[in-house]
Amino acid sequence: MDEEDCFIAYRQLEEILDSFDLEWVTEQVDQTIREGKNIEENQGRNRTEEYSVQEQLLLLINAIEQAVVNTLEIATEMSRFLSAQELSQEVRFYPSDEREGDFFVFAPRLLEERISSARELRDYLNNLRFEVNRSVN
């Protein structure tokens, strides 16, 4: 993939994340990109260097995998644990100490569909990562 292809892919992934209210993933990657990559030089000195467009896309791919795919694996393990302990399979996560307002419900019955989608997403991300790495090397 050339620079233009990587730039387009980055923007498309960014739009997809935004449509699923996951803009925070892109914001964190953008922050990492603004900070630049740390390069160690001789005598313990460091300098920063800009990420290439390909590296920026790889950062986003990795962030999506961490935020979406890997968190589902955690949820699956949590479901197995709760089931093995014969505990309630529904867990509510609140944004603060208060028990009012918005909350996220972890419900294992919803995992099956999400697991299938996560596998497809992981395959897509791995294929995209392969194409980017192939163009860099």
Image (tube, helix red, strand yellow):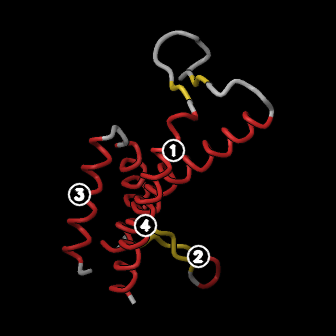
Q: Nearer the viewer, mark 4 or mark 3?
A: 4
Q: Label 2: which residue?
A: 45
Q: Of helix, strand and loop, which one carries label 4? A: helix
How would you rate the neighbour count of disc 3 (Cα within 10 Å): few for under 14, some for 14-19, many for 20 or more?
few
Residue at (41, 60) in percent of width and height: 120
The residue nearer to you, when weighing 86 against 12, is: 86
**Residue 103, horizontal then vertical, whole percent:** 50, 21
Report the side of 105 relative to 24 (left or right).
right
State which tag comes first along the sequence, 1 or 2.
2
Looking at the rendered image, the quarter that the N terminus falls into is bottom left
Q: Label 3: which residue?
A: 12
Q: Nearer the viewer, mark 3 or mark 1?
A: 1
**CA gap, disc 4 to disc 3?**
17 Å
**CA gap, disc 3 to disc 2?**
37 Å
Q: Nearer the viewer, mark 3 or mark 2?
A: 3
Q: Label 4: which residue?
A: 123
How would you rate the neighbour count of disc 4 (Cα within 10 Å): few for under 14, some for 14-19, many for 20 or more?
few
Q: Of helix, strand and loop, which one carries label 2? A: loop
Residue at (23, 81) in percent of width and height: 2
